[in-house]
Amino acid sequence: MYERSLYVFGTLVSVSAWTSDEAAFDRAVDQIDRRFQSMHRDWHAWRGNGELVRLNQALAAGESMRVSDFLLPLLIQGKALYDASDGLFNPAIGRLIALWGFHDDEPSGGLPPDPGAIAKLVDAAPGMDDVSIEGHRIRATNPWIALDLGAYAKGHALNVAIRILHELGIDNAIVNAGGDLCVSGGHGGRPWHIGVRHPQGEGVIASLDARDGECVLTSGNYERYREYAGVRYAHIIDPRSGYPVAHIASATVIARNGALADAAATALSVAGAPLWQRIAGRMGVDEVMLVDGDGRVYLTPAMKRRIDLTPTGGARGK
């Protein structure tokens, strides 16, 4: 077993592999690091002068911009995921995210944003259906559009990392970015056994064996939040109300497509208990676990068949 850690996307990324070729592993991790650093630079929504920052500046000025082959597939996928989620996953609400202070590495405390400012952005209704993609040229028909890809870019990046490992002959690996992960193969003839963090306490709430090619992504109100007067405001914003989600503590999704799992975890957190099953069906994910604000656990039948809600420890990952 070989293992290395990187720091990117504002989190610790660990790459572990079961292999006899240490040199190939090191080359793969070096390549993953370079690719991830490029993603962090060019897909960052508000820092520096990366491609997404420049695109948002162009859209805010009412202009179009030609984007690279590096960014274009992510934007195309963002539109498809937005449509499939009935707009509950919405990468176009960057202004709302900024208003709540989640464009800072450490979200500020203090009073929540002015309700009038929130209502103004909600009424403007920025959505991915306002984003036009013609070849490589991107334009927006809504001036309130600000793209933030943070809710699914990490999932996409995890798939890229597994692909790089495969290309260099590393077929048994796990890439874990702050608890979100994708796996390939297994280790020592066993599957990768992972734990899902308990959103309301220490340790894990469940564990499972991850199968070859699967990604396990979780959105939770414990990951990133601001707090004022004893109230925690999670980083997951409901685009319909403009306010952070309060009714779901975490949503975990398993899928082979990391971006899909990432986006679905966000959309299902927003959907909550009344709507999550319909949205999961629309997005084509059938292995889902939700934990609501009262600690109740909701499972799809497919997830129930494979998850252990009474783990015994030793689980890796989430």
Image (cartoon, rainbow, N blue to C red):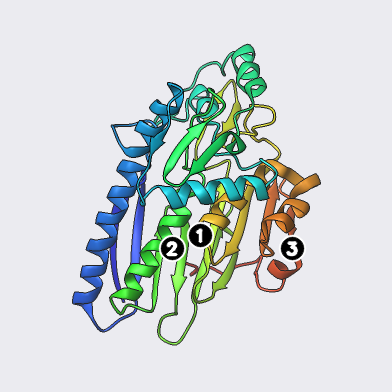
Q: Residue at x 69, y 27 (%)?
A: 241
Q: Is residue 278 left or right of residue 268?
A: right
User: Does residue 199 appear in the picture of this structure?
Assistant: no
Q: Position of residue 33 (x, y in %)?
A: 26, 56
State the separation of the CA atoms marked 2 and 3: 24 Å
Kind of element beneath mark 1 = helix
Which residue is denoted by mark 1 in the rendering?
258
State whether residue 318 is above or below residue 55: below
Q: Residue at x 25, y 62 (%)?
A: 31
Which quadrant would residue 187 be assigned to in this image?
bottom left
State whether residue 212 is above or below residue 270: below
Most foreground residue, 200 or 12 = 12
Report the disc number at residue 300.
3
Residue type, numbered disc 3: Thr
Which one is earlier in the sequence, the residue at label 2 or at label 1? Answer: 2
Proximity of marks 2 and 1: CB atoms separated by less than 8 Å: yes
Which one is earlier in the sequence, the residue at label 3 or at label 1? Answer: 1
Q: Is residue 151 left or right of residue 270?
A: left
Which quadrant would residue 128 be assigned to in this image?
top right
User: Does residue 161 appear in the picture of this structure?
Assistant: yes
Which residue is denoted by mark 2 in the rendering?
159
Which quadrant would residue 227 be assigned to in this image?
top right
Which one is earlier in the sequence, the residue at label 2 or at label 3? Answer: 2
Circle 2 residues within 10 Å: few <14, some 14–19, many ≥20: many
State whether residue 270 is above or below residue 36: above
Residue type, numbered disc 2: Asn
Q: Position of residue 70 (x, y in %)?
A: 36, 51
Q: On the rendered image, what quadrant is the N terminus found in?
A: bottom left
